[in-house]
Image (cartoon, helix red, strand yellow):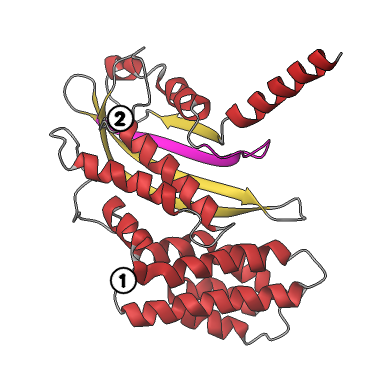
Amino acid sequence: MKHIILVIFILMSFSRTSAQEISCEVTLNLDALTTAEARENLSDFKQQISTYINNHRWTREDFGDEKILCSMDILIQGATGSNQYMAKVFIGSKRPIYKSDKSTAVLRLVDDKWEFEYIRNQSLMHIDNRFDPLLSFIDFYIYLILGYDADTYARNGGTKYFEKANDIINLSRSAANAGKGWESTTQGIYSRVMLLDELLSPKFDPFRRAVYTYYYRGLDSLFSKKKERALKRMLSALENIQNLQEKYNQPSLAIRTFFDTKYLEIAEAFLDYSDRDVYNKLIEIDPAHQSTYEEYAKKPRR
């Protein structure tokens, strides 16, 4: 009997420690493709990418049964040459809010510069220290998702994952076929390199500490009896981000991504705050979403 119990314990332990951390929903839009051949070649692409993400063991951490929920919505924008594709991808992730049945968005961004080659039924295998235009893009964003999630539970908890994402950027610099989006400077409002540079810069430690405070010391207490205290901590975190922005004195991709992800949640959360002038403060902190804060300022307190 003791031997049976020991075997069961070992099997349960193995199952727990070997479980994957990510549960990613992948969608694929092929409407922009004009040839049947290009569409047919991608007939198994969605399933292949989904399997690659969800079946790989990305960390050595024990996440238990609580996987990180994320999504990748892939819009194929065109095909150039044999099996070469260009895509725009929406990346999103969320996590549960403590002691509630609600979840909170952690990351929401759009990358419109993915270039890769794909041949139907090709084998997709994760290999560290090798750059691949198809898989390195996926790896980069999974590590980014892991880092963003970890930063909400511990101060600078995501550093090791951001460093893994930065390793991919470094590999891209010596890859002849890296494609667009890996340049140090890039046209447009979003840059993978710029975002990682900020997240790993000591100058942005106050931002990442503020993110931790917003989630772990604020949002996770929002559904307790100490809601007012939780809101004050959230507001303090937002003010710290504002102070960094004023000190930085130039556009910040990390800060903009944060507010683009969180502004609706912020506006709704502060409906319960005792001081209605808080919305004027939120407009100062996040002027890009002024109209939303003005709209919520007119709503009655719940």
Residue that badge 2 annotates:
134
The residue carrying pointer 1 sits among few (fewer than 14), some (14 to 19) or many (20 or more) residues within 10 Å by Cα, namely few
In the rendering, at what x and y percent does residue 251 appear? 31, 71
| Vertical comparison of 7 with 229: above or below | above
The residue depicted at 43 percent of the width and 81 percent of the height is: 243
Looking at the image, the residue that sits furthest to the right is: 1
Q: Which residues are magenta?
A: 60-78
Residue 224 appears in the rendering: yes
Q: Which mark is residue 251?
A: 1
| Vertical comparison of 256 with 127: above or below | below
Nearer the observer, 200 or 222: 200
Helix, strand or loop for disc 2: loop
| Vertical comparison of 109 with 59: above or below | below
Residue 109 appears in the rendering: no
Do tag 2 and tag 1 residues touch (Cβ < 8 Å)?
Answer: no
The residue depicted at 20 percent of the width and 55 percent of the height is: 187
User: What amino acid is labelled 1 in the image?
Assistant: Pro
**Residue 65 lies within the magenta run:** yes
Nearer the observer, 132 or 300: 132
| Vertical comparison of 124 with 225: above or below | above
Q: Which mark is residue 283?
A: none
